[in-house]
């Protein structure tokens, strides 16, 4: 079952720095929601609050009927949440296949400790995990890379490997942080097909942070725009792109970047 996610008045502060202010929105089950906004708007921090990497200063985050604000990432992962990171951290001297298999560790008897100690693979569940990881890589057009070392792949492809790893825990809620950054046009098209299928066939609720507005327009029927930690507007991708407040928010950061 896809997850219903509801955030109400989420605030995040670090000392005197306000990162998020009264962020309220819902992600509907089985839908793909876009989260956009200029650099520094707070998108990754918001993901960190949802995934348990940050504890919101105040506010509510409901995962179906449960309040999850402040729950640790490992618990949320078992509960059905998986994510990818803006800057993926793969085990660089391990193979792509081994990296993807790590995502299934919650379902393996040995657990992450046995994995990190490289205890040799044994048993039927182990083989099932391997087969499943390979199938996911092939489905995402990465079967050719299964036995390459992770550091032989481009940074863009690391994100696709990370997506396979996230899928191994069979999530009902998936958070993707800039999955298309560094990908070629062909790889972006493949990503769009994969993410669409995940929502439609695997019944996942997906939130995607992305600057590539073609991807956002093709994947989502609703987007949330964040600026300076607050929700600026909510609507379709086309409405967001035409909204003067959104245009100004993006121009504002470009002007700031130019001045820097
Ligand atoms: N752990 C932290 N301590 C202090 N400031 C932080 C921390 N994490 C994020 N921030 C600040 O929050 C703001 C939003 O950052 P971020 O969430 O990465 O934005 P985005 O992903 O939209 O580019 C930035 O000003 C950043 O410096
Ligand atoms: Mg970010």
Image (cartoon, rainbow, N blue to C red):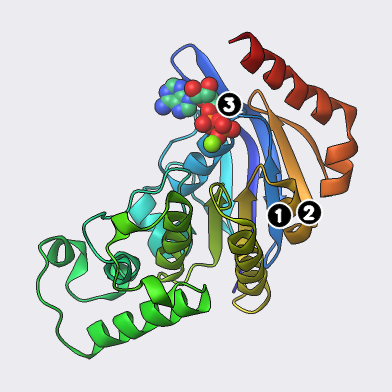
Query: Element type at marker 3?
Result: loop
Residue located at (20% from left, 67% from top): 111
In x, y percent, where is residue 144? 40, 75
Tell me: 94 left or right of 229.
left
Q: Residue at x 69, y 39 (%)?
A: 24
In the rendered view, tell whether residue 28 sits above or below residue 126: above
State the image coordinates of residue 30 (x, y, percent, origin top left).
Answer: 68, 68
Q: Which residue is mark 2?
A: 217
Q: x, y (%) of residue 9?
A: 65, 34
Residue 67 x/y as whole percent: 52, 50
Is the residue indicated by label 1 positioned so its CB lies within 8 Å of ligand 2?
Answer: no
Q: Quadrant of the C terminus?
A: top right
Q: Which residue is mark 1?
A: 215
SS for callout 2: helix
- Examine the rendered structure and indicate whether residue 193 appears above or below residue 188: below
Q: Is mark 3 within 8 Å of ligand 1?
A: yes
User: For the N terminus, which image quadrant?
Assistant: bottom right
Side (left or right) of 64 relative to 15: right
Badge 3 crowding class, 10 Å Cα cut-off, few under 14, some 14 to 19, many 20 or more, is some
Mark 1–mark 2 CB contact (< 8 Å): yes
Q: Give the mark, 2 or 3, whose residue is nearer the N terminus.
A: 3
**Is residue 3 in sight in this rendering?**
no
Query: Residue at left 44%, top 67%?
Result: 164
How far is the residue under mark 1 from the one under mark 3?
A: 20 Å
Can you identify the residue that label 3 sits on?
40
- Residues packed near mark 2 inside 10 Å, few (<14), some (14 to 19) or many (20 plus): some
Identify the image quadrant of residue 251.
Answer: top right
Q: Which quadrant of the figure shows ligand 2?
A: top right
* In the image, residue 213 above or below residue 158: above
């Amino acid at each position: 079952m896809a997850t219903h996610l509801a955030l109400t008045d989420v605030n995040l502060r670090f000392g005197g720095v306000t990162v998020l202010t009264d962020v309220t929105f819902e992600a509907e089950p089985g839908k793909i929601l876009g989260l956009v906004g200029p650099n520094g708007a707070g998108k990754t921090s918001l993901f960190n609050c949802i995934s348990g990497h940050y504890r919101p200063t105040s506010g509510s985050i409901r995962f179906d009927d449960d309040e999850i604000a402040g729950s640790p990432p490992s618990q949320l992962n078992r509960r059905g949440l998986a994510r990818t990171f803006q800057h993926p951290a793969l085990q660089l001297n391990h193979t792509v296949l081994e990296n993807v298999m790590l995502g299934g560790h919650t379902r393996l008897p040995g657990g992450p400790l046995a994995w990190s100690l490289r205890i040799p693979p044994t048993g039927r569940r182990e083989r099932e995990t391997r087969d499943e990881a390979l199938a996911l890589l092939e489905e995402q057009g990465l079967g050719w890379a299964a036995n390459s070392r992770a550091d032989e792949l481009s940074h863009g492809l690391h994100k696709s490997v990370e997506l396979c790893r996230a899928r191994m825990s069979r999530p009902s809620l998936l958070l993707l942080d800039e999955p298309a950054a560094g990908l070629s046009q062909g790889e972006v098209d493949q990503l769009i097909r994969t993410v669409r299928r995940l929502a439609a066939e695997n019944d996942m609720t997906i939130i995607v942070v992305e600057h590539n507005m073609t991807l956002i327009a093709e994947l989502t029927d609703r987007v949330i725009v964040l600026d300076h930690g607050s929700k600026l507007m909510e609507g379709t991708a086309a409405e967001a792109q035409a909204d003067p407040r959104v245009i100004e928010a993006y121009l504002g950061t470009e002007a700031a970047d130019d001045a820097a």
